Image (cartoon, rainbow, N blue to C red):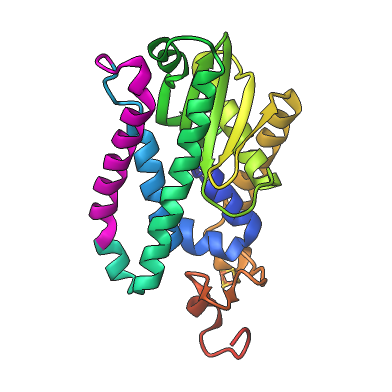
Amino acid sequence: MAKRVQSPSSINTYRQCPRKYFYQYILRLPTGENIHLVKGKIVHSVLEKFFDIDIKHFKEENYKKELSYYMKNLFNAFWLKSLEKFEDLRATEKEIIGAKQEIAEMLANWLQYFFDRIDSTGLSFNEAFKKFRPVEIEAEYESKKHMVKGFIDVVEHVDGEIKVLDYKTSGSFEISDNYELQLAIYALLYSEKHGKMPNKLSIWFLKDKEQIIEMDEKLIENAIKEIEGIHQKTESNAIDDYPKQESGLCKWRTGKCDFYDECFRGSARFK
Ligand code: SF4
């Protein structure tokens, strides 16, 4: 059977629960939205559009004000577009106000970091903005050789170094094994397309700060092993080859896995 194209998400889903992988990537059952996903999409959209701004007419002494105003407008535009989704999710007023506040804080955190970064260069605003403008944003990469693909949030070339970066809106600020694997897959994809490895890999925890890891060949070797392992484990189309991995991620106080009813309909477990 032909290999399926994998992604960091599909691989992490398999690692979390093979049965979940089966429902999501083989049967392709729909997955639901939730407030966290909607918040994440708004933040990603604002940061994706941020560097589209034309800074030609910015005055050096006003650039922080101008960029803050521009980001606020972007946020408002994406927020208004997403209001319907909060309504579809039957979010309460308190949840909606909380979500807006949370997004505003993440964007303000990122913007302050960007200002600090510009100020630290000693360059004019114009020069520093160009220096830090990513060379790619939300770029789709695919490897036919390894049958894996992914969207890289940001690729930067700064001072002769290449960095690939992923934004996270989660509340935990550790580069977990899953995040490390995701970054290693991005590095593999980048190197296959451009013929050279990135120097740095980064997760930008938007509620905290950016965390950078240096490129290491071992990360790539592990990523290739992991991808090959998933290809082997997902050759079958039979549900029995994808065992349930029951955990606290099946059902928790405020929600449940998208496939909980498929797994436990009629069962007393986790009720
Ligand atoms: S409910 Fe639990 S066992 Fe079933 S697919 Fe989801 S995570 Fe896996």
Q: In the depicted view, which residue is nearer to us: 176 or 73?
A: 73
Query: Can you say whether 106 is above or below 185 in the image?
Result: below
Q: In the depicted view, which residue is nearer to us: 109 or 225?
A: 109
Give the left or right position of residue 173, taking residue 83 as reference: right
Taking the spot 38% from the left edge, 12% from the top edge, the residue there is 126
Taking the spot 29% from the left edge, 25% from the top edge, the residue there is 53
Q: Specify whether residue 4 is painted magenta.
A: no
The image position of residue 233, as x and y in percent, is: 64, 51
Q: Specify whether residue 75 is painted magenta.
A: yes
| Residues drawn in magenta | 56-83
Is most of the magenta stretch helix, strand or loop? helix
Q: In the depicted view, which residue is nearer to us: 137 or 233?
A: 137
The image position of residue 34, as x and y in percent, is: 41, 64
Query: Can you say whether 196 is above or below 39 in the image?
Result: above
Rendered image quadrant of residue 181: top right
Taking the spot 32% from the left edge, 33% from the top edge, the residue there is 49
The image position of residue 133, as x and y in percent, is: 42, 20
Query: Can you say whether 80 is above or below 127 in the image?
Result: below
Give the left or right position of residue 141, taking residue 216 as reference: left
Furthest toward the right, the residue is: 218
> Where, quadrant-wise, is the C terminus in this rendering?
bottom right
